[in-house]
Amino acid sequence: MLSGDFPFRKVAILGTGLMGGSLAGALKALPVPPEVIGTTVSSDDRVLALERGWVDRFADSNESAVAGVDLAVIAVPPQAVPRVWGEIVGPLPPSAIVTDLSSVKGSLYELYRTSFSALLPLYTSSHPMAGSERTGIASARSDLFSGRTVFLTPFGSEKNTLLPLVRLWQALGANTVPVSPADHDGIVAHISHLPHALSYCLLNLAEKVRQENRYPGFDWKTQKGGSFSDILRIAKSSPELWADIFFQNRTAILDAIESFDREMGVLRETLRRGEPGTLVRLLSEWTAPLSGGNPP
Amino acid sequence: MLSGDFPFRKVAILGTGLMGGSLAGALKALPVPPEVIGTTVSSDDRVLALERGWVDRFADSNESAVAGVDLAVIAVPPQAVPRVWGEIVGPLPPSAIVTDLSSVKGSLYELYRTSFSALLPLYTSSHPMAGSERTGIASARSDLFSGRTVFLTPFGSEKNTLLPLVRLWQALGANTVPVSPADHDGIVAHISHLPHALSYCLLNLAEKVRQENRYPGFDWKTQKGGSFSDILRIAKSSPELWADIFFQNRTAILDAIESFDREMGVLRETLRRGEPGTLVRLLSEWTAPLSGGNPP
């Protein structure tokens, strides 16, 4: 996309942590960057964002930050999004588009539909499949969205809010995929929330085995190999944030866990039967998608 | 440990793939490196190992490779180890120590105890908690074992084979942990084999959801975020090798899966009850070991 097509000139980023901060940095790396107004509760993040030139100025409140903008990005934890809606609904210019970066959409959409659809009609929710187990702008990266997928879920009845957000994310190097709230939540239950659930359970199991001293001398902290370390990294994300995500998407996650259990049941049954040939065939079949088509 | 204490002067590495090749490279990086004789079925690996100076010469067979050595390292897939025992039992010098790098010990130990304990009495089995989803000496690294744990499982009744192997691995920068065959297999079922099982099941579930077109436009290959990618890397290992490992350690893996299911049951029940406070407490408690004590 040509930079001349970039649809926004003045952007409020409400919450300049890891995600919002990375977005600010990515916007400022554009050939013709928009003006960026930020809000944050962290004075460290504020100093760093200004030093890096990622944010032009910080506002004292979300209300004052959105005055005169053409895009407001709500980049706070999912449970705090509705509170921010209430704050910006008055001062937001009528032509401004609103998005958020929440990782769960269904419950948010229900609240939007019943209480905010008339107040914030130009609304498309975003979910960049990018992030980190770390938090704060110190860990933010201006190339965080490059090559990643951003799911876009139009909330408002005004469907023409989708295209400007497609242009925004594509200008930052991302691929955009439009999805309904329910499909979004089903997808991320499988490819993001379930991996986190597996990681938490594996960590707790290993710690339990260690504490019980089931194997004298066992300590996963020092003895783990690559596979355990890879899964464990996922559990390093904030438990508060992830409890919030799990709670909001619990129905889809419970479904995904049930489907996962069926796959584990197939593997368990194959192990029980103890036929090496069947086991090789199963694992070869299951891993075939990794070698064919797009490199994973 | 001082290099003067290094206990071996002439080492045969039977199988110079990723693990055996890395061991050869690590030995040649020692201040006073031993002579290294290799065997391999791959002519590419042979050329590369000689070019790098990691192997002094290749023998035509495992039989001829072990003539005159003071250590024989069997670095072939676990199911091929007993065949190599049969090949080296004649030409191996009576004072030479034997080890292998197998990731499962119980079934191997049973075979050793019943058929080879009198023939190969100086035997301690090794399992470095290091590796890669890649194979071959091209992916080998001379620092692969640095900072890693190596489980050591004495097989022979001659217990004095343990100390020379402790010295070997410590000289290469590893931490050694002595364990019985049963404890070894229980430990790796939890911290290595279970992570692989979870990864295979998650991959197959995601592919099934994609193939069913349950969510229009869904494709895990392009849309996955960091957590899915981390778990997926584990499934890239050779399915043949891992079917072999799963088969050999199936009893301990089935136990570990059962224990894992109990943790998943606790998480599932907490999600079902739908109390945000209980969920935060559960995830905070489960992830507490990551912040306390040794950094994970």
Image (cartoon, coloured by chain):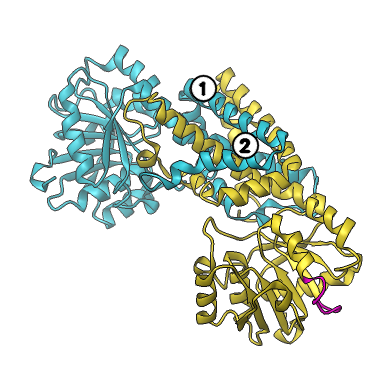
Chain colours: A yellow, B cyan
- Closer mark to the observer between disc 2 and disc 1: 1
Residue matched to label 2: B201
Q: Is residue A214 left or right of residue B114?
A: right
Q: Do we see residue B203 in this rendering?
A: no
Quadrant position of the N terminus of chain B in the picture: top left
Q: For numbered disc 2, what is the local secondary structure?
A: helix
Residue A93 picture location, percent across and down = 82, 79
Residue matched to label 1: B255
Is B193 rendered above or below residue A85?
above
Amino acid type at image mark 1? Asp
Pointer 2 and pointer 1: residues touching (CB < 8 Å)? no
User: Dot 1, crowdedness within 10 Å: few (<14), some or many (≥20)?
Assistant: some
The residue depicted at 54 percent of the width and 80 percent of the height is A50
Residue B119 picture location, percent across and down = 22, 17
Residue B267 picture location, percent across and down = 63, 34
Q: Is residue B171 left or right of residue A173?
A: left
Is A171 rendered above or below residue B34?
below
Q: For numbered disc 1, what is the local secondary structure?
A: helix
Q: For the residues tagged 2 and 1, is the chain the same?
A: yes
**In the picture, residue A281 is in which quadrant?**
top right
Total numbered badges shown on the rendered structure:
2
Magenta range is A88-96
Is A166 rendered above or below residue B95?
below
Residue A91 magenta-drawn? yes
Amino acid type at image mark 2? Cys
Query: Residue B222 bears which disc, if any?
Result: none
Q: Principal SS element in the magenta part?
A: loop
